[in-house]
Image (cartoon, rainbow, N blue to C red):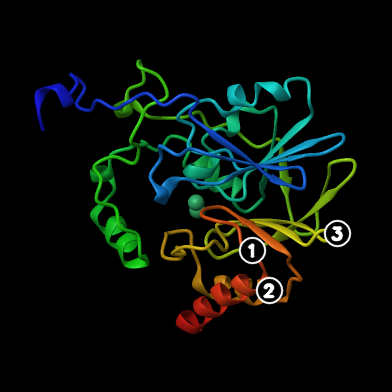
Amino acid sequence: MSESAMSESGFQLPVRTPWFERRNVGDGITLLTEPAVHRFLRCNIWLVSGRDVDLLVDTGMGIASLAAELGDLAGRNVLAVATHFHHDHVGGLAGFARRAVHHADAPLLMAHADDKRSLAVGDIPAASRARIRAAGYVIEEELFVRAIPDAAYSVETYSFQTVAPTQLLTEGDVIDLGDRSFEVIELPGHSPGSIGLWERATGTLFSGDAVYDGPLLDSGLESDIRTYVATMQRLKKLPVQVVHAGHDDSFGSARLHELADAYLKTRS
Ligand SMILES: [Zn+2]
Ligand SMILES: [Zn+2]
C-alpha cells in the first residue's frame, strides 16, 4: 500500500454522503441501505409510512445516524422494531424513542451491549470467519466498509450505543399504524427471538434474517437448527405476496418456497 493511501490511523477511505441510500419500493414502503457496508453486514432497513405511526424495521450498523437521516420524520410517531439482536440490525436503535424487540432477544441485545465492535475483518475470530465462509460468504476485503460517513470518522473506533427496548414483543402482537397493521410472528432459529412482521391484508412479510435470498446463517452461538427447521416449515405455509428480508433483494412466494426447501433439504 502506498503512503498516500494510508492515513495516520491506518485506513484512508472516501467520504460517502448521504450515508444511506433510499428507495421507494411502493405500497408506502421505503428501503434504506448502507451501500458502503460490505454485503455480509449490509442490512435492509424498511420504513413503512402509516397514517398514525411510521414503522421502522431494523436500523443498520450505527455508523452514521439513521435518526438524523430520517429527520423528515420529526414529529411523527415512529416505532423502531429490531427483527433480532444482531449488531448489523440494531446499530441505530438508540436514536429512536420507541424501540421494540422480541422478549427472547432483548436480553441478548443487552448482553452484547458492551461488546468491542470492529469494522476490521481481521478482528473476527478465526472460527467465526470459517463459519461465515462455510455458509457461502466471500470476504476478501480488510474492512467491512469502503467509505466513511464524514472525514472525521475513524473506522478504528467504531461503536454504537445500545439502549434497552421500550417494548417487548411476542407472537401475535399487533403493530397498528392506523391504516394498516402488522402481526408479530416468531421465526426463531437464526436467533431465539427472531421475528417477522406480517401484513395479512397485502401478503407482505418483513422476515429479518429468518429468510433472505442469500447464504443463511444458523451456526452462531445463539442459533438453533431444530427451531430453524420449524420456522422454515411455518414460512412455507404463509400466503405471502412479497418478502422484504433482512438482507439482499425482495422476493415472492415461489422463491420463498425454494429457499425454505433448500434449507430443509440440508438440515432435516
Ligand atoms: Zn442476523
Ligand atoms: Zn443480518
Marks 1/2 in contact by CB < 8 Å: the verdict is: yes
Give residue 69's position: percent from left, percent from top.
59, 25
Depth check, front residue: 83 or 162: 83
Q: Residue at x 55, y 65 (%)?
A: 189
> In this image, 118 relative to 50: left or right?
left
Residue at the disc numbered 3: 201
Which residue type does callout 3 highlight?
Answer: Ala
**Residue plotted at (10% across, 33% down):** 1
Q: Amino acid at mark 1?
A: Leu
The alpha-carbon separation of the residues under discs 2 and 3 comes to: 18 Å
Residue 172 placement (x, y as % from top left): 80, 58
Residue 187 bears which disc, if any? Answer: 1
How many numbered marks have been drawn onto this rendered protein structure?
3
Percent x, y of residue 219: 41, 65
According to the picture, the residue beneath numbered tag 2 turns out to be 234
Q: Is residue 94 left or right of residue 153?
A: right
Q: Earlier in the sequence, mark 1 or mark 2?
A: 1
Whether 84 is drawn above or below 55: the answer is below
Q: What residue is rendered at 57% in x and 63% in y? A: 211
Label 3: how many Cα within 10 Å (few below 14, some 14–19, many 20+): few
Eye-nearest disc, 1 or 3: 3
Of badges 2 and 3, nearer the viewer stands 3
In which quarter of the view is residue 5 placed?
top left
